[in-house]
Image (spheres, rainbow, N blue to C red):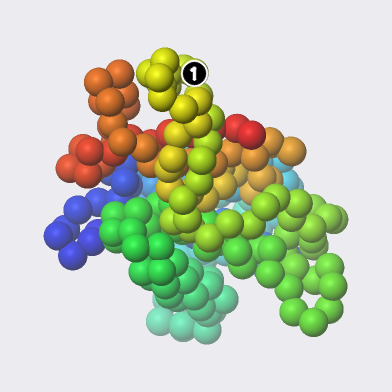
Amino acid sequence: MRDYNGNNGVGGDTNILSFQDRGTKFRAAVAVNGLTEEDTTDALRFIKGSDEWNILYADDYGGYKAASYKVGAAFQPCQPGVHHSNGLIENANLQLEYDIKVCLQLAGLPACFWPYAAVYCALLHNITFGDVPHESPWYRKFGEEFTGKLMPLGCGVWFLPAPTKYAPDKAAPNMSFGIFLGYRMAPGGRWGGGNMFVVTCLTSSTSRSRSMHRAPLTAFGLTIQSRCS
């Protein structure tokens, strides 16, 4: 995915590997730098975590086939030319794409922030349920509802900066102001490894944090900051 200027996503990512479990409808989205076998394998291992997979349904792409065997799942490709054979994931991809567009527009963020919006939108799908309680994909997968504080993408937040990133000046407040970019997910789709809540923010760059720039953030004069609370 690229923005209208042809730039990659934040961090240089170029594609999204999306996943949806057929049983629980649980979704995951991982931004990757390419479509190589190594990139696909790393993304699938992160999505899988400690789960047990029997069959991986995907497009008939060489990277998926080799990666599925590496994560311990049999590979079943869709039938070429038969669209309904991969209709479930194609529909999920379309919904994810629309959700990303809406979230970024409402947040006032440029299109290059789609790697963060993709993870956030997948989480929103997982924790949403209809009229029947405990019918969300999150509950069906983990047996409990999402316990985190739900915040809109792009909202302003005050946070304590990680001491390993930078330290405020002595006369400055201990907390910094940033932009909420979503939740840091653990392997398998869990939230922050249990009760840990991680906010990823944007803060004004300083002389002590310029080395942490991740393209194309240099053009914005911003730096990625993570913090547990």
Horizontal relation, residue 193 to residue 36: left or right? right
Residue 105 location, x and y as percent?
36, 69
Q: Residue visible at 25% across and 41% down?
A: 217
The residue nearer to you, when weighing 92 against 191, is 191
Residue at the farthest front position: 171
The residue nearer to you, when weighing 161 against 38, is 161
Horizontal relation, residue 226 to residue 194: left or right? left
Horizontal relation, residue 72 to residue 135: left or right? left
Q: Amino acid at mark 1?
A: Pro
Q: Residue visible at 47% across and 55% down?
A: 155
Indicate the quadrant where residue 144 lies: bottom right
Q: Quadrant of the N terminus?
A: bottom left
Residue 15 location, x and y as percent?
35, 55
Residue 68 location, x and y as percent?
55, 49
Q: How many marks?
A: 1
Residue 64 seen: no
Q: Residue visible at 28% across and 26% down?
A: 206
Pointer 1 local density, CA inside 10 Å: few below 14, some 14–19, many at least 20: few
Residue 67 location, x and y as percent?
50, 46
The residue nearer to you, when weighing 213 against 169, is 169
Residue 185 seen: yes
201 shown above or below 17: above
Q: Residue visible at 36% across and 37% down?
A: 203
133 shown above or below 149: below
Q: Where does label 1 land, which residue?
A: 163
99 shown above or below 112: below
143 shown above or below 208: below
Indicate the quadrant where residue 214 lies: top left
